[in-house]
Amino acid sequence: MSSPSKRREMDLMKLMMSDYKVEMINDGMQEFYVEFNGPKDSPYHGGVWKIRVELPDAYPYKSPSIGFVNKIYHPNVDEMSGSVCLDVINQTWSPMFDLVNVFEVFLPQLLLYPNPSDPLNGEAAALMMRDRTVYEQRVKEYCEKYAKPEDIGAVGEEKSSDEELSEDEFAASDDEEIAGKPDP
């Protein structure tokens, strides 16, 4: 096995072991989707995006191609294609980086610190510079409209095994729907 394919396999496994939901697109390990949650302390918090990742043959020497599948309102993400404008991925990529860096550092940083002076979405950049409050409201509207778990094909947010339902959540769970409706 050649070194780049071994590294690709290792990075993908490391990403999966880091509790990211990864969905392979085909039989190879070069194209897949990753479920990405908006970072806390940002207007993107609560949003869930499906990120398409394509690894070039020369990965890790060449950067992965990253794109948002469901819509996001951000100065550095093209609203139609989902393409990401991020220097560390597009220009300054290094084989020292791996896929976990992309999802734990680079994308959260992009959402926490947008760069309106280098936009792919000019409207979002202009609004951010003109009125930050209205910009953040628009971000939240997009999260509500396009970035819910059901928007990426997830059934619902999964609870980790160390969390239990609160009394309110337990009471709110709809047992009737599971068991079916009673006969008239």
Image (spheres, rainbow, N blue to C red):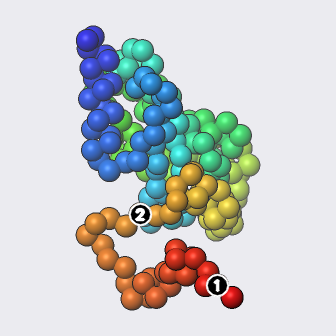
Is residue 87 among what the camera can see?
no
Residue at the location (44% across, 82% down)? Answer: 169
As drawn, 9 above or below 45: above
In the foreground, 162 or 48:
162
Pick the quarter of the image with the C terminus: bottom right
Residue 82 locus on image (x, y percent): 62, 39
Q: Which mark is residue 183?
A: 1
Q: Are marks 2 and 1 in contact (CB under 8 Å)?
A: no
Q: Earlier in the sequence, mark 2 or mark 1?
A: 2
- Residue 158 has which mark? 2
The residues bearing labels 2 and 1 have C-alpha atoms spaced at a distance of: 31 Å
Residue 103, image quadrant: top left
Q: Which mark is residue 124?
A: none
Q: Residue at x 37, y 84 (%)?
A: 166
The image quarter in which residue 163 lies: bottom left
Q: In this picture, is 69 found above or below 112? A: above
Is residue 83 visible to the viewer in this orientation of the structure? yes
Q: Amino acid at mark 2?
A: Glu
The residue positioned 46% from the left and 88% from the top of the image is 171
| Residue 118, percent from left and from top | 60, 38
Q: Amino acid at mark 1?
A: Asp
Residue 170 versus residue 13: which sits nearer the camera? Answer: 170
- The residue tagged with tag 2: helix, strand or loop? loop
- Residue 88 versus residue 38 in the image, above or below: above
Image coordinates of residue 85 in percent, x first then y, are 56, 36
Q: Quadrant of the N terminus?
A: top left
The 10 Å Cα crowd at callout 1, few under 14, some 14 to 19, many 20 or more, is few
Residue 84 occupies which quadrant of the picture? top right
Q: Looking at the image, which residue is at 50% across and 52% down?
A: 111
